[in-house]
């Protein structure tokens, strides 16, 4: 079988999860790394067995003729890279956050639509194995009609004067932090599980004075289906597990026939009304990132690309997440629910 060729762009913190996962996709070969600092690209190329490095994406695409590009760079660089690939009709997988602003995100989507280029946002939380399993349980009617979802997250990496420095120091200077970086994952996951959001109410706070953005959020969602969702999160206080970045929190999903619970170690239980809580067995590996969701995202991208199927997180659909995200910030500013977005 002929392998699909990819160029990856970027060598930041999260890119390592990409390179490791691509190495396990049998029908894909990363043929080049593009990065502004070529020495960093060369280090990754040596580690992951990639032949080519460079700092000029146009030249690399024209020479290597990839089947797609994977953009793993900061949001402010995405539009320029998308334009380069789209003008050459190269399919694109682009990391979130999609862009620094909603307007620029819309420009990205307009660009790929103009050139009729396959485009998927790398939004991997919906591909975490526990969320896929919860979706399956809901579809099977295990807890009846869904009516409420509550996710509680305590990351514990944002307190103290050195907050975020070891892993992602740029978090410290972001004017929008928690909802922009983490909340959008759950907006997308909630939409995946319960459909379209009709209103949002947000309370945002900053606990750590050394950062610029919010590190605490309480978001309340109403869905067109009548479901109510709550996202209660902060990066300041700590959880009681060794790896809070495995599930990122605890999830309670309730229906008119019972409840589904996700625990911090990835365990899922089901409790029917009037019955006892029972473990629900399923596969959730503790490798790569958050249940191997990067790998799962890639599997979906390649399958859809090869078979001309729609991406779950395509451009127009992802703009719906960003519209809700913008509404959350507006709600916090105005101190009232936002129902039109």
Image (cartoon, rainbow, N blue to C red):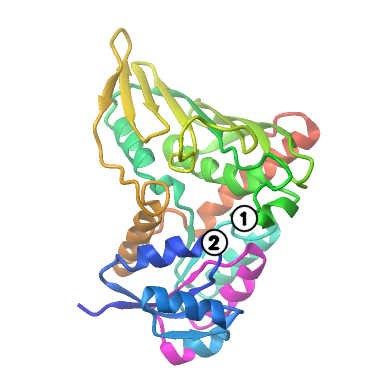
Please check the rendered image and state whether residue 234 is part of the magenta-colored stretch, yes or no. no
Q: Quadrant of residue 110?
A: bottom right
Q: Quadrant of residue 205?
A: top right
- Asked if 8 appears above or below 206 in the picture, the reply is below
Percent from the top left, x then y, of residue 104? 68, 63
How far is the residue under mark 1 from the one under mark 2?
7 Å
In this orientation, which residue lies closer to the viewer: 269 or 1?
Answer: 269
* CB contact under 8 Å: marks 1 and 2: yes
- Asked if 234 appears above or below 182 in the picture, the reply is above
Apparent side of residue 80 relative to residue 292 in the rendered image (left or right): right
In this orientation, which residue lies closer to the viewer: 139 or 301?
Answer: 301
Percent from the top left, x then y, of residue 27? 26, 72
Local packing at callout 2 (Cα closer than 10 Å; few below 14, some 14-19, many 20+) is few
- Asked if 124 appears above or below 269 in the picture, the reply is below
Q: State the quadrant of the C terminus.
A: top right
Identified at 46% across, 54% down, the residue is: 313
Apparent side of residue 272 relative to residue 195 in the rendered image (left or right): left
Identified at 61% across, 49% down, the residue is: 181
Apparent side of residue 114 relative to residue 163 in the rendered image (left or right): left
Local packing at callout 1 (Cα closer than 10 Å; few below 14, some 14-19, many 20+) is few
- Asked if 15 appears above or below 88 in the picture, the reply is above
Give the labeled residue for mark 1: 168
Q: Which residues are magenta?
A: 62-88
User: Can residue 7 be seen in the rendering of this structure?
Assistant: no
Percent from the top left, x then y, of residue 99? 64, 60
In this orientation, which residue lies closer to the viewer: 32 or 4?
Answer: 32
Give the labeled residue for mark 2: 13
User: Can residue 330 be seen in the rendering of this structure?
Assistant: yes
**Which element is circle 2 on?**
loop
């Amino acid at each position: 079988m002929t392998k699909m060729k990819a160029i990856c762009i970027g060598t930041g913190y999260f890119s390592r999860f990409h390179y490791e996962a691509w190495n396990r996709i049998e029908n894909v070969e990363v043929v080049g790394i593009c990065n502004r600092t070529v020495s960093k690209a060369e280090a990754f190329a040596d580690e992951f067995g990639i032949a080519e490095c460079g700092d000029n994406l146009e030249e690399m695409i024209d020479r290597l003729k990839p089947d797609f590009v994977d953009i793993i760079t900061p949001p402010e660089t995405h539009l320029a890279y998308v334009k380069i690939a789209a003008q050459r009709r190269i399919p694109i997988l682009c990391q979130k956050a999609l862009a620094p602003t909603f307007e620029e995100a819309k420009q990205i989507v307009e660009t790929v639509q103009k050139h009729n280029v396959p485009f998927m946002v790398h939004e991997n939380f919906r591909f975490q194995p526990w969320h896929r399993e919860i979706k399956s349980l809901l579809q099977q009617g295990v807890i009846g009609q869904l009516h409420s979802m509550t996710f509680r997250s305590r990351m514990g990496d944002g307190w103290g004067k050195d907050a975020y420095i070891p892993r992602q120091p740029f978090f410290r200077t972001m004017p929008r932090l928690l909802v922009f970086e983490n909340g959008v994952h759950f907006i997308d996951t909630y939409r995946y599980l319960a459909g379209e959001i009709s209103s949002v109410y947000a309370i945002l706070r900053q606990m750590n004075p050394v950062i610029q953005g919010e590190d605490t959020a309480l978001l309340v969602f109403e869905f067109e289906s009548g479901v109510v969702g709550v996202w209660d999160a902060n990066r300041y206080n700590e959880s009681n597990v060794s790896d809070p970045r495995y599930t990122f929190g605890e999830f309670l999903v309730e229906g008119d026939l019972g409840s589904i619970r996700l625990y911090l170690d990835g365990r899922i239980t089901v409790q029917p009304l009037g019955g006892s809580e029972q473990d629900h067995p399923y596969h959730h590996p503790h490798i790569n990132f958050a249940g191997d969701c990067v790998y799962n995202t890639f599997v979906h991208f390649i399958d859809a690309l090869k078979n001309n199927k729609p991406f779950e997180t395509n451009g127009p659909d992802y703009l719906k997440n960003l519209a809700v995200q913008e509404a959350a910030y507006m709600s916090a500013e105005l101190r009232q629910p936002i129902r039109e977005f």
